[in-house]
Image (cartoon, rainbow, N blue to C red):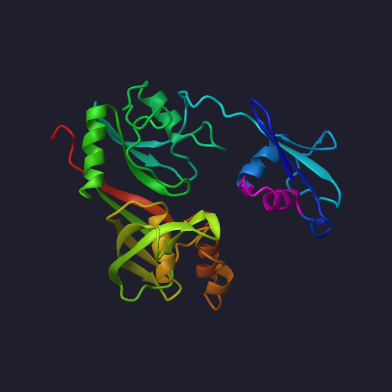
Amino acid sequence: MRILRVRKATTYTATVPQDKDRLRLDRFLADALRELSRNRLKNLIEDSYITRGGEVVSDVSAKVKTGEIYAVTVPAARPAIPLPQAVPFGVVYEDEDLIVIDKPVGLVVHPAPGHPDGTLVNGLLAHCAGSLSGIGGVTRPGIVHRLDKDTSGLMVAAKNDTAHQHLARQLETRTLSRRYKALVWGVPDPRQGKIETAIGRNPANRKKMAVVKRGGKAALTHYRVLKPAGTKASLVECRLATGRTHQIRVHMAHLGHSVIGDPLYGGSPKRRLNNAPDTVRHALAAFNHQALHAYLIGFQHPTGG
């Protein structure tokens, strides 16, 4: 493999070795080009940025053949200036200082590589007519904290810098309360407790976080079982004392009770559903995203209201 850098884009080339013959295109490229995530490569394939012998290949499942040479062009980044767009989300409360949002599953919070638009930020710019705090920078106006793409629920965004500073201070001092409901595999024992570890990047998979012994950041999650569903699953409330990336998902998996539907930390549901009643098996297997919802957020209003 060699890399040719040009002024406005980066082009990678990869030749298929014999041991990769008949592999799916997206998998081959993910193995060959470790600089790019498989999801990023999938988007590039579907957007016609991959060629073979000068011909565009846009089928992610196409089988590669020994000796073929693929060129992958990563386009230059667009200017990071999000535009107002009509993006659906719920509004729970709003005044001149802040807005409390009910974020749906599947909505990315702010623009990032692979998601340049159609984000919550684009929707907020349209809804608030540009009246948002600028402290978060040009790509994150108003954003005080985040939720994962496939986590639903409540977020608070700031409409001015004063409100942003007040809310950020509450996050820092742990006086901004965030509670979640999660449907997890099994029933935690004890049914109430805390998970206190360090969380850092998973050394084997940079897309994942993990409980680590060195180099991570302190993370604390309080949990309690709200309602068991037999022995196969339970509804759990999780209260964040810190806000690390994927914190609840990592901590519940570490506890041995990962969030149902979690594609990164949940494991295979088939083994867990052995001997479960049909109704339970069908209901739990139906989740195509993590069953995690931010149902409560508590804070002191920036103006004391």
Magenta region includes residue 123: no
Q: Main secondary structure of the magenta part?
A: helix
* Foreground pick, 248 / 88: 248
Is residue 221 shown above or below 108? Answer: below
- x, y percent for residue 265: 50, 61
Measured along the vertical axis of the image, is residue 37 above or below residue 272?
A: above
In the drawing, does residue 57 fall left or right of residue 276? right
Q: What residue is shown at x 54% (from left), y 37% (from top)?
A: 113
Q: Where is residue 250, by image quadrant? A: bottom left
Picture quarter containing residue 8? top right
The picture places residue 124, in percent across and down from the top left corner, at: 39, 29
Residue at the spot x=41%, y=75% of the render?
230
- Residue 191, x across and y down, in percent: 31, 73
What is the residue that sits farthest to the top in this orientation? 129
Magenta stretch encompasses residue 35: yes
Q: Is residue 19 above or below residue 256?
A: above
In this view, the residue in front, 77 or 127, is: 77
Q: How many marks?
A: 0
Where are the magenta residues, as a range?
24-38
Q: How far across and down, in percent of the image, does residue 288 sit? A: 54, 55
Q: Is any atom of residue 95 visible in this view?
A: no
Q: Is residue 241 visible?
A: yes
- Position of the C terminus, as image quadrant, is top left
Residue drawn where x is 86% and y is 52% of the image: 66
Name the foreground residue: 262 vs 247: 247
* Outermost residue to the bottom: 275
Question: Residue at the location (84% across, 57% down)?
Answer: 18
Q: In the shown orientation, is residue 181 left or right of residue 24?
A: left
Residue 294 placement, left or right of 67: left
